[in-house]
Amino acid sequence: MKPTLTLFFIVLFNLSGFSNDGYKLWLQYYSIQAPQEWQVNFLSNYEVIGNSATLSIIKKEIAYASSGMISSHPEIKNSIPSLVIGKAGDLSAKNISNPGINSLASDGFAIFHNLESKQLIVSAKTDIGLLYGTFRLLQHIQTGTSIPKEGIFESPKVQHRVLNHWDNLDRTVERGYAGFSIWNWHRLPRHIDQQYHDYARANASIGINGTVLTNVNANALILTPEYLEKVKALADTFRPYGIKVYLTARFSAPIEIGGLQTADPLNAEVQAWWNQKAEEIYQYIPDFGGFVVKADSEGQPGPHNYKRTQADGANMMARALAPHEGIVMWRAFVYNEHTPDDRHKQAFNEFKPLDGKFLDNVIIQVKNGAIDFQPREPFHPLFGAMPNTPLMMEFQITQEYLGHDTHLAFLAPMFEEVLKDDTYANGKGSEVAKVIDGSLHQYAITAMAGVSNIGTDRNWTGHHFHQANWFAFGRLAWNPYQASQEIAEEWLKLTFSTDATFVKTMTDVMMNSREMVVNYMTPLGLHHIMAASHHYGPGPWVSGGRRADWTATYYHQANEKGIGFNRTYTGSNALSQYASELQNQWGSLATVPEKYLLWFHQVDWIQPLQNGESLWNNLAKQYQKGVEEARANIVTWENMREYVDDKRFNHVLSFLTIQAEEAAWWRDACLLYFGQFSKMPLPAGVESPKHSLEYYMNFKPHHVPGI
Amino acid sequence: MKPTLTLFFIVLFNLSGFSNDGYKLWLQYYSIQAPQEWQVNFLSNYEVIGNSATLSIIKKEIAYASSGMISSHPEIKNSIPSLVIGKAGDLSAKNISNPGINSLASDGFAIFHNLESKQLIVSAKTDIGLLYGTFRLLQHIQTGTSIPKEGIFESPKVQHRVLNHWDNLDRTVERGYAGFSIWNWHRLPRHIDQQYHDYARANASIGINGTVLTNVNANALILTPEYLEKVKALADTFRPYGIKVYLTARFSAPIEIGGLQTADPLNAEVQAWWNQKAEEIYQYIPDFGGFVVKADSEGQPGPHNYKRTQADGANMMARALAPHEGIVMWRAFVYNEHTPDDRHKQAFNEFKPLDGKFLDNVIIQVKNGAIDFQPREPFHPLFGAMPNTPLMMEFQITQEYLGHDTHLAFLAPMFEEVLKDDTYANGKGSEVAKVIDGSLHQYAITAMAGVSNIGTDRNWTGHHFHQANWFAFGRLAWNPYQASQEIAEEWLKLTFSTDATFVKTMTDVMMNSREMVVNYMTPLGLHHIMAASHHYGPGPWVSGGRRADWTATYYHQANEKGIGFNRTYTGSNALSQYASELQNQWGSLATVPEKYLLWFHQVDWIQPLQNGESLWNNLAKQYQKGVEEARANIVTWENMREYVDDKRFNHVLSFLTIQAEEAAWWRDACLLYFGQFSKMPLPAGVESPKHSLEYYMNFKPHHVPGI
């Protein structure tokens, strides 16, 4: 009843819990229990050399981290600082040097022990490199991971590491499930919200160096002075954190805001308009990153309207940006309901012939798979197929097809799966990651984009665990070869606790979570069977409407004989777009991995799979397995109560409960629907559906967020 | 550079500033510097008698308050508790009693010194009364205001103290400027967000006991099981805080969700539908508060569609709710573009003849003025005119017409002005407050509603100072006679600091702020000259469109001779709806208060006012004065830096800067526009406009929030 008025009490209420709404992300800087000497040393006895906006941020960050992590520990005083943070040039005045610094990229960093002076040094060629190094060191301190004897010398493997916000100017967010846009355009440019700083700081802490502020389904208004003034205010805020601003350019902007009659990329007036517009933008934002363009896709205008190629369109914008060192990220997500071919094939067919036809400051932004951010897709066949045109990766961090806000799915294993896939472009060992980091084809530009899952929710991402997907994207954009397990562990330690049991248990949960979602949504290579439009919940019955390739029946092709999309040479032959090694492996029922089975093949219901049981039984059991995994997560989480503050614990618990219920919804709806065709009974161990198929088909929740 | 690792440091970073985003509202519980013995005593040596959900909340609240307010102070141990919190019945077992408790309302409270035991007692008849008393005591402790010798015995003077959320089911908020709706319908009922608890707690701390979850422009979906299940989850969450849930009932719901052909209130099927619907709602929510209805207004369906009266409509719903003790709050905001009469008069003309025709569980919700929440309006003529029908007050806390999110305007003086206005209904001394608390006409039901200014912004209300308007509404609903100055002082102390200079300075700023807004927007009785539709910024030129009474020219009637709406007997004669005392005073140019001058009169530009100068000069100087006041506030606030944490300080500073700029925008646009008619020069001291009239008329910002 009576409060005990001790330091512990204060720490309890103010640092580690009572009001922890998750806003602090992986930058919790929670109090380290029994810190080791090195942790205290670095946080209390340090020197940051120099002055700049970025260096001020570094200084504030260490002070803040220190106040949280070692608040209750007595300060250590020494004659010389234990930690020195300074650019290579500034260090030489102190007779500190290290050859490893020379080979760093401009935004790389070094953390090393200087044996002469017995100091730890964080160095880099630029202030931003120092910022990255500082964040990395603070992460080591929080997780209790000492700096190895040989030091850490890291440069990012990808140049442009950008978040794509699908945020509209009215603050709705397309495919956003964590509230609304954090960009309060109305208050800009005059009110710079603290959250803009916190956003930039969080991104910098994981190496993200670019942000595309607006939806790919673009509004030309963003390119008018009314909005450019606001964009400039954000760019000015983000600059000291090393973050460049990009905008989505609506292809028809010359008509909509320019007063022209055409947007034809070969029209001189149109070209002049874009040149002038670029000039204007760079007057507001001298380091403007460039344009992201979605053209000729899902109703967006593009070069097709004028019978021009994607290269014509991209190069027009590239010419406008080139004098200012801006780039064009041109999306390959081009498909058309009037093209009678498998949607899977259309981007490849459109872009492959254009290889080498793009200007040097164009990079083609390719989704990880050929359809659309499904829970599982084989890698996009364009990767490896365009040696003469830089390709970048587009991942979707927001979970359009993976359960929206409430379904825990750690996406790093999905990203990793694609990055590790072998394209065989230059023979075995031609992994997608090597396309992305440019090493396979010696691309001069490299980039990775992630469609943001950030919104106005107090914890930024809706699900506390979806913060991990933002974090993982940053880590993988920095280093596409990093293991997702390592990322999960680090995130857990930074965000919640370094307790070994907690980290081990929850790493397992996270590492399995995406596979679990595949199990209860789209096992064995099924895809795009979500409800129409908002993609929330099951919709295997979705058919009709404006275009076949927006229906579920198009993708699963279920009938009384079997199920699956035949993409072999007897079918759409999308498989032909992959290397022959993959055609051989994926093209045969005997060798195709079961995870891709129904992606490439139509398979009889009674076909035995590897375990000897029928396809139907396997399908049903996979759905059941997913449900059981979701339920088990609740129990596991309940055992984690002691490691997590109440607020976040309860928040996650309720979401896990929703996920388990919705997993069962998915299982029941899909098995009832597909069971109409298979006419086979549910195998033992698979629960009977709670309701009738009719019930599920008529269950249409209103006002689903994100569209 | 090096952090000083002391308690001070922790307090600095975690209690009073570093991360203060304003979420804690007036419940900051910041550390009391040099607390007095009584403050420490009550917070560290107390007893709460009994157990219930509400009592748990009380216990947690005191522990939390204690951890913040006296964290660094040694605990005081005594054999008996210094503070006892318990219901009257529970106290008698301890031989503590006080006759003052007997006369309390069920939700009133007593805080008194028990001389025998030398204890402070918080008591009440109910748990909710105890909760109110506890909050009040904690507020006394934070502000350092000791409990007077005679104690505090308070019952609310108004029974139903409700917030009206104009929140749509897609989470947009009509006239909401602080982000989006905090009701995440999609995640309900399964995820109960911590913010719902924090919302209820904040409301309970100021005595609010009801919440209308949905927009008055209602969506019938809210009455379907899909949503009632969600409403129930909120009601269950709010119940221990003493907060009842109400819904807006769409008049045409029987057609839209009931499958009927009509919504005629005299149709037996329609009546049966509402009866059944009420029955259903009460199965979900046994203590459901009732319906709020906007009918026959601005396109909403209503009894007029069936040639029935407002009483027919209200009574139909009242009959459905009566068996469950629910009430109907039926809005008097009824007007029609097909009625050729001054909009000012229409509600009175509609409702006055129905006085006494409503069932006992109906209360008519009347806006403070007859037009629509203008910066200044004379009180609504219905107040005092319906002795046989309970009337309730509807204030607008959200600042639709007072500058939206960024304009500091403390609204309590505006509320107070109306509450103190004398209706003369029963002779002199018949103030509006006496209508609202029921004492003038012996109303059996009393209520006050405030249109919420709450949204997803991290500080709830957009402008930090707009938290004060939510706070003030709660205080005035509890006691419509409380002085707004007292409310401002208390809010400042609870929210920022008890420093005398700070409180004095900022109380002055707050107390003058609404008058300042009137000065730079609508001086001398001008009204409704805001921009069309969103009402952001000046729009004195607004005319045409669908209805005259939605234009500015209708309201200001400016021409070459003069300006103002003639509502005397030579004009619309709206004045005739007021008592003869007011007709005499307001009807004559010689005696009308200048603040209402152009509300009731059309006045020549050259007409000398009290100061001997022309109307035009007075008008121009009032605009200039408002601008200067807004600029002065910036300077004043800059001097307050030492009292306020950085985050909130900078946030407020940027908003004050916006306000000063927009005040000048208002002045320039209005004086240019009206100057066309007056053709008189700007008097000395009034700055020349920055741009041309054409510029202002063409300045149309996009995506203004709130609609």
Image (cartoon, coloured by chain):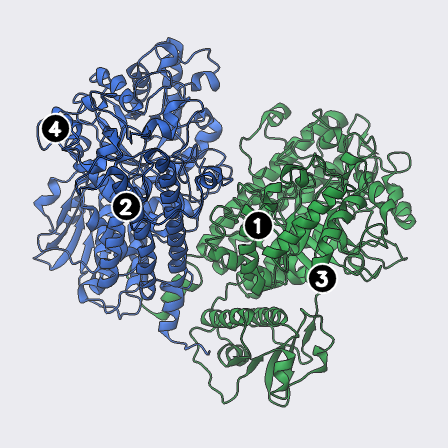
Chain colours: A green, B blue
Q: What residue appears at the point 64 percent right and 59 percent down from the top-left corner?
A: A474
Are the numbered discs 2 and 4 placed on the same chain, yes or no? yes
* Mark 3 surroundings within 10 Å by alpha-carbon count, few (fewer than 14), some (14 through 19), many (20 or more): many
- Disc 2 versus disc 3: nearer the observer: 2
Which residue type does callout 3 highlight?
A: Gln
**Chain ID, mark 3:** A
Mark 4 and mark 1 residues within 8 Å of each other at the beta carbon: no
Which residue type does callout 4 highlight?
A: Tyr
Q: Seen in the image, is A183 located left or right of residue A372?
A: left
**Where is residue B319 shown, x and y percent of the image?**
30, 18
Of the numbered discs 1 and 3, the one sitting upstream in the chain is 3
SS category of the residue bearing label 1: helix
Q: Seen in the image, is B133 located left or right of residue A315?
A: left
SS category of the residue bearing label 2: helix
Q: Mark 2 points at which residue?
A: B621
Of the numbered discs 2 and 4, the one sitting upstream in the chain is 4
Q: How far apart are the alpha carbons under marks 4 and 1?
A: 56 Å
Q: Mark 1 points at which residue?
A: A228
SS category of the residue bearing label 3: loop
- Disc 4 versus disc 3: nearer the observer: 4
- Disc 4 versus disc 1: nearer the observer: 1
